[in-house]
Amino acid sequence: MDLRRRAEVGARAAVLDGTVTPRPPRPHRDDVLLAVVSVFAGLLLWALGVHSNATRHLLPAWAALVPLVSLGAMELLRRSAPRAALAVGTAGIVADQFTVGNLATVLIFTDLMYAAVVYGKPAMARRLPVTTGLITVAATITAVAWLRTPQALLIGALTGLVCFAPALTGATLRNHREAAVAARLRAEQTALLAEMDRSQAVTAERARMARELHDMVANHLSAIAIHSTAALSIDSPATSREALGVIRENSVQGLAEMRRLIGLLRDAGAGTEAAATPSLDGLTALVEQAGVTGSATGLEFVLLDGRAPGDAGGPLPAPVELAAYRIVQESLTNAVKHASAGTVTVRVERSGPLLVVGVDSPYGPGRPGAGPRAPGSGAGLVGMRERTELLGGAFTAGARDTVWRVRAELPAEEKAAER
């Protein structure tokens, strides 16, 4: 067993380091069948006395079998070594002209020429049709000039049938195959691009749904968390009752928002009326609700709407109004959760082609003891920035002195908003 394993390891190492060449591929079974049938047919024609050059007796009749067998053996290499097979086949067809000849030898040579174009290297496949075409023309001109009879044209025609026609047929088939492969590759690339587009669309839709869900629910859940904590930490029936009222109101509103979003995701019925999209007209109610929620933390909210009632710029695009509303909503939610006691100012104004939204909230360590902080994940700022960038606007958020400022510049024109 040890000797056997050593021999196997040594053989593998010899193959890997190049000292032993790998075995050549076995001939295709169709090539084997073609070789056997061709040689058998040639032997049958020779036995029956059917020769292509019956008047030539330069060599014994059996000499015609040598090119026949040689070319028949080359049929085994027509796929694996087409160049070598064609070289031997060319020498064999020339030698066949000095014997009584065999029609099977000529047919085998035409197949070797065809296989050299189909299975050979691209350079050889390009050159053979041109070369054989020139040979056909040269043979025709030489025959006509030498014999000076109309029958001399038959020599050129036979030369073309034996070498040029198979090469041209092989080139045509190869071009069709390459075109089919190219078409398949293009189809695979198109399918891959379509799959990538679908994946990107799904990712973008998931991100949009995540932003919408966060902006709708975070405000209500933050208010619920703050007031429930206040109710648990302050032992006062009046405070608990007020907190429970705010909790109930935010729970009902949050549930309504969730139902609206679920209805949109389910595409609830083509005949049902679509739910209204939040717009800047609802900012007053939004700020008032934030005032109720933030009262326990010592916050006051002020809305400064600088938009003119009959603005010459026309109505705002729906995506812009929705983005502005969600940015204000998320900013108010962050103020309720994190801002110090003071005044939160919401500014909305239209400046030329831009809609400017700003929210300023007190920033600092001071916060009333009765106002607990709600935890944050930072997803709100990411969502606001994504909403602004998707519309081609600019977004900034950060602390300046004792004020946390959020500012978004959104395109107020329809064409800009549809980018």
Image (tube, helix red, strand yellow):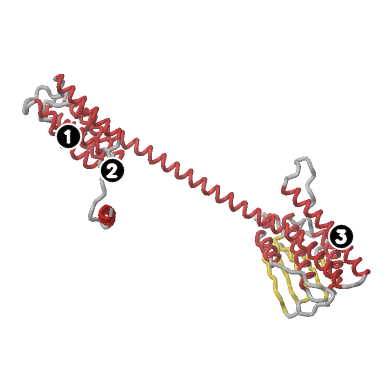
Question: Looking at the rendering, which quadrant does residue 17 occupy?
Answer: bottom left
261 or 390, which is in the foreground?
A: 261
* Mark 2 residue type: Pro
Dot 3 lies on which element?
helix
Q: Earlier in the sequence, mark 2 or mark 1?
A: 2
Q: Which residue is mark 3?
A: 248
Q: Is 379 left, or right, of 228 in this rendering?
A: left
Q: Which mark is residue 70?
A: 1
Secondary structure beneath dot 2 equals loop
Rendered location of residue 287, percent (x, y): 83, 65
As drawn, 207 above or below 127: below
Q: Is residue 19 left or right of residue 62?
A: right
Mark 2 vs mark 3, CA separation in Å: 80 Å
**Which of disc 3 and disc 1 is earlier in sequence?**
1
Density class for disc 2 (Cα within 10 Å; few <14, some 14-19, many ≥20) is few
The span from disc 1 to disc 3 (Cα, nearest Å) is 98 Å
Which of pointers 2 and 3 lies earlier in the amino acid sequence?
Answer: 2
Q: Residue at x 24, y 31 (%)?
A: 35
Describe the element under mark 1 as helix, strand or loop: helix
Give the residue pinned by disc 2.
25
